[in-house]
Image (cartoon, rainbow, N blue to C red):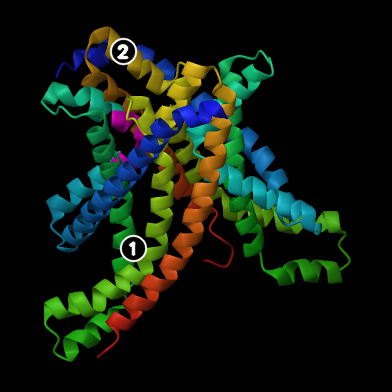
Amino acid sequence: MKPEVILHSFGYLTRAAGATIAVSFAGIVLGFAIGSAICAARVSRRPWLRRAGAVYVSVFRGVPLLVQLLFIYYFLAEYGIDVPAIVAAVGALALSSAAYQAEILRGALNAVPRGQGEAATALGFSGLDIWRRILMPQALRISTPPLISEFILLLKASSLVSVVGIAELTRVSMNIASETYRPLEAYLAGGLFYLAINLCLAALGALAERRLGAPGAR
Amino acid sequence: MSLFWHYAPSLLSGFGVTILCWAAGGALGLMLGFAIALIRRLRLAPVNGLIRVFIEIFRGTPFLVQLFLLYAGGPSIGLRLSATAAGILGLALYSSAYFAEIFRAGFAAVPAGQIEAAVSVGMAPIDTMMRVMLPGALIAAVPSIVNMLIILSKETVVLSIITVPELMYQVQTMAAETFTAFDAIFGMAVFYWLLVEVVSRAGARIEARVTAYLAHQGAPA
């Protein structure tokens, strides 16, 4: 063991950790936008929309992320769309995460008691107001802890984008391993960075769960 | 299409390696996870502390980094493994952390009253374990186990990165040799989607069967 390998490349690893967080954050935010649309499709009144939403979720949860990532990467190349690899990387993370986030949001919507929507209708709320003032705030509240769990999963999954050459934590650990011939120290250091980030996120999740517990749980 | 037939043998062997890694990694992970959950029940403070650290590490770091650590970092501490062996061991260690938590939740789901009842009718501790706690815990755990095994089947493609000759690796080799990257990866995506759909459906059936069997076993004779 040569711990100085880790100390020497600490700055390098810190920047790489920033890249990992940035890529995952972009993926989760974009995934939330797409996931909300998929969720809306899945609870829509139109059967074909519901069907399309279900197929999306089934495909993106069924195909391994690495396959999705390379598919998007080669798809862009096949059709001559010349974009940096980071677009394929964030795109793959977002599309995959959207499927999981859509299911989290749908579950949260179902957890809001039916009677509340009915009561609002009886009081003369418009459909949009019911969404905006009653369903959405509660669904977001219920879904915050599982969304943070999803962020942790995505952060770990983002290690796969090292395959298309993004200089994030895993890729940089690989570079350090090959430059110093010290793979054990390099990957231990990379792993520790992931662990530190995820423990912080898990603590945040626990806090969110206490603060935003489902109404009626207390 | 003729290209496909040319590569059929290597694709088939890749599929075999995928199934081997999945089955071996999953089985070892289940056993290790179950052992961890049992040891945890002994409530030995230092041991449980170590177990918690083990679980946090394997659930808090990416599977890919764990694989690199095993395969590339292993030789530094005298652990020399072939890519496939490292892949199987990696899958086993990674999944064991999740399985340990699944079994722990399963044991927690057995109502305390059932255990008290077993003790009060004079059941030996081993019988209480085998006839009351274990069936109850397994019934509670089966859906999560099936779910984790499905997640694990998708993780096997990551093994291609450390050159385990499984299906993804063979597909990428074929793609590189024939310049058909897009078609190859498209085929792979469709194949995996179908595989996971079939496994999920089968999983739901197995779940129902196992639950029925265990409920019968656990019933007083």
Residue closer to the observer: B67 or A33: B67
Residue B115 locus on image (x, y percent)? 24, 81
Residue A196 locus on image (x, y percent)? 35, 32
Position of B94 relative to B80 (above/below):
below
Check disc 2 and give the amino acid type. Answer: Ile
Check disc 1 and give the amino acid type. Answer: Ala
Residue closer to the observer: A215 or B88: B88
Residue A207 shown left or right of residue B132 in the figure: right
Q: Quadrant of the N terminus of chain B?
A: top right
Residue at the image point whose x is 22% and y is 79% from the top? B131
Residue closer to the observer: A199 or B154: B154
Residue at the image point whose x is 76% and y is 66% from the top? A117
Q: Quadrant of residue A125?
A: bottom right
Q: Quadrant of the C terminus of chain B?
A: bottom left
Q: In the rendered structure, the residue with mark 1 lies on which chain?
A: B
Residue A176: mark in rendering: 2
Position of A52 relative to B9 (above/below):
below
Residue B181: mark in rendering: none
Q: According to the image, label 1 marks what residue?
A: B105
Q: Which residues are magenta?
A: B58-67
Query: How far is disc 2 from disc 1 in space, using C-alphas?
Result: 40 Å
Q: Is residue A17 magenta?
A: no
Residue at the image point whose x is 21% and y is 29% from the top? B82
Residue A86 shown left or right of residue B44 in the figure: right
Q: Main secondary structure of the magenta part?
A: helix
Label 1 secondary element: helix
